[in-house]
Image (tube, helix red, strand yellow):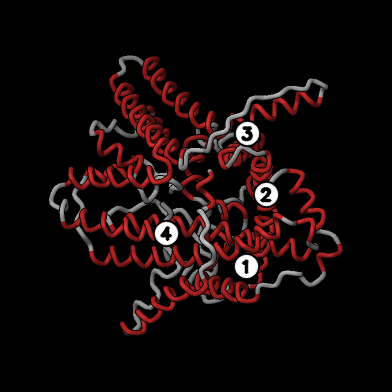
């Protein structure tokens, strides 16, 4: 069930009405309703994998309790590693088995040993990377004595499978979400309206910008040998806006939907393309994953406390692991490696926390220096996106080789004028709202009501008039 589908447009109001008008005085019934709705939402993708979600939930629920009851540290560590091994085992089996077996066969072939590897012909369970990381953060927090185990199976199950975040995040923490699930929620009209406004902006980003950019980017990347350098560069730029508006659009819809039910999810994007260096970019892009790797991998490895070699090693580890988390392809690993390289100058010079504020904060326009650094950062991100989007490493290098040829300075053979206008208008709105939680959070709040509602209706009309062909959200495949 896609957020941008008729099915979800029917599903959401039904759950909302049952939640606030039938079960609102009973917290247990509210949570049961959310759990049933979440399992139904997930089953709409493929009901067979629902059992995998339930098993993963039961595993971490049980091991969390057993860790808290363990009499020795050795036994506590046993339950921790049992959970980690099984969770990562399932993730590795479904997501990475073919990658490893094919890479091993290719390595043998290079030394003259030809094999016929057996590969899996199964689809990847949607959302497995996300709900696996939900569960892992929970058991790791218990092991570190940050939280106590949750003994209410319904409340814990809602934490893992809450439908707005189930298939593509944000990756929640038990310390943040579980307390909200355990306490009575009271309907707040202003929060609900704010949630609808964020859903509206998320739909605009996905349907108008991302889906239209996808059509152009797919055409160019899928037929890259037929185009010159300037068209290939345009394809990279459109993919950059596709992946940003697709994933941040999903996150906006998820956060807005959760707010309709009185629940606040972690923010996942903070206008990353307005970053002045790569370190700032990664503080603003896929925030829930970046902070997950920071807290559960980077800091345990030593973080930035050690010497230069240790800091560099830790950065490369988390970015390569992050790349591998995104997909079983060498292209993602190179993408992670590139971003680690980008980070090195600021890490080694200890300037990675220079830009903790919002660019041009309190000002309408940025300085020329800020424009230059935003342009460089965007350019570096776009170059790395080539590997993220390419079908193979060979495809990526061929794409780059042709893009940086003399044809880079020719007129692009594809010139979608209306889409370019829409992207520019989108960027203007994002820039004006960059100090808010999302771009239109404060749009028109001081305007007369008819004018404000007219602005919202214009966005709705734009969704219907300019909406591209329906595309799945990119991060469903991760």
Q: Residue at x 38, y 27 (%)?
A: 143
Labels 4 and 3 touching (C-beta < 8 A): no
Does label 4 or label 2 sit earlier along the sequence? 4
Marks 4,2: beta carbons within 8 A: no
Report which residue position mark 2 lands on: 342
Which mark is first along the chain, 3 or 4?
4
Q: Going 27% across and 55% down the picture, which residue do you hit?
A: 261
Say whether disc 2 or disc 1 marks the residue closer to the N-terminus: 2
Q: Nearer the viewer, mark 4 or mark 2?
A: 4
Per the model, the C-alpha gap separating discs 2 and 1 is: 18 Å
Give left or right: position of 133 versus 415.
left
Nearer to us of marks 3 and 2 is: 2
> In the image, which is nearer the foreground, mark 2 or mark 1?
2
Q: Which residue is mark 4?
A: 5
Disc 1 designates what residue? 370
Determine the residue positioned at 30% across, 37% down: 157
- Determine which residue is flagged by label 3: 310
Residue contact at pointers 3 and 1, CB within 8 angstroms: no
Label 2 close to label 1 by CB (< 8 Å): no
**In the rendering, at what x and y percent does residue 465 appear?**
49, 75
Q: Is residue 80 visible?
A: yes
Give residue 154's quadrant in the image.
Answer: top left
Question: Which element type, helix, strand or loop, lies under badge 3?
Answer: helix
Nearer to us of marks 4 and 3 is 4
| Residues marked 3 and 2 touching at CB (< 8 Å) | no
How far is the residue under mark 3 from the one under mark 2?
A: 17 Å
The image quadrant that residue 407 belongs to is bottom right
């Amino acid at each position: 069930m896609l957020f941008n589908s008729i099915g979800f447009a029917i599903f959401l109001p039904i759950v909302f009405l049952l939640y606030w008008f039938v079960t609102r005085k009973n917290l247990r019934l509210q949570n049961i309703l959310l759990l049933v709705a979440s399992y139904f939402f997930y089953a709409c993708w493929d009901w067979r994998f629902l059992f995998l979600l339930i098993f993963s939930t039961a595993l971490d629920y049980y091991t969390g309790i057993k860790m808290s009851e363990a009499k020795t540290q050795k036994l506590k560590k046993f339950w921790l590693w049992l959970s980690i091994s099984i969770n990562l085992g399932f993730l590795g089996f479904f997501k990475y088995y073919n990658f490893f077996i094919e890479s091993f066969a290719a390595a043998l072939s290079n030394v003259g040993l030809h094999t016929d590897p057996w590969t899996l012909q199964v689809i990847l369970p949607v959302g497995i990377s996300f709900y696996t990381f939900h569960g892992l953060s929970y058991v790791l927090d218990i092991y570190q004595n940050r939280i106590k185990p949750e003994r209410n199976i319904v409340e814990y199950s809602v934490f893992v499978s809450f439908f707005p975040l189930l298939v593509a995040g944000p990756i929640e923490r038990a310390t943040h979400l579980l307390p909200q699930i355990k306490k009575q929620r009271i309907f707040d009209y202003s929060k609900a309206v704010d949630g609808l406004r964020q859903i509206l902006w998320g739909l605009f980003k996905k349907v108008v910008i991302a889906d239209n950019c996808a059509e152009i980017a797919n055409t160019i990347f899928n037929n890259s040998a037929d185009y010159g350098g300037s068209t290939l560069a345009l394809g990279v730029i459109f993919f950059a806006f596709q992946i940003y508006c697709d994933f941040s659009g999903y996150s906006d819809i998820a956060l807005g939907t959760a707010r309709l039910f009185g629940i606040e999810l972690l923010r996942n994007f903070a206008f990353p393309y307005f970053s002045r260096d790569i370190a700032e970019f990664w503080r603003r892009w896929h925030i829930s994953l970046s902070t997950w790797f920071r807290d559960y991998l980077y800091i345990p490895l030593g973080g930035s406390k050690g010497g230069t070699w240790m800091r560099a090693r830790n950065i490369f580890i988390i970015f390569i692991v992050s790349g591998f988390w995104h997909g079983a392809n060498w292209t993602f690993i190179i993408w992670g490696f590139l971003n680690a390289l980008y980070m090195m100058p600021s890490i080694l010079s200890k300037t990675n926390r220079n830009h903790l504020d919002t660019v041009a904060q309190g000002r309408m326009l940025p300085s020329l220096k800020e424009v230059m650094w935003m342009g460089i950062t965007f350019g570096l991100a776009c170059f790395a996106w080539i590997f993220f989007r390419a079908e193979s490493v060979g495809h990526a290098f061929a794409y780059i080789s042709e893009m940086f040829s003399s044809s880079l300075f020719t007129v692009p053979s594809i010139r979608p004028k209306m889409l370019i206008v829409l992207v520019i208008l989108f960027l203007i709105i994002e820039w004006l709202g960059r100090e808010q939680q999302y771009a239109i959070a404060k749009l028109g709040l001081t305007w007369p009501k008819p004018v404000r509602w007219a602005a919202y209706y214009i966005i709705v009309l734009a969704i219907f008039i300019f909406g591209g062909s329906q595309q799945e959200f990119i991060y469903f495949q991760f």
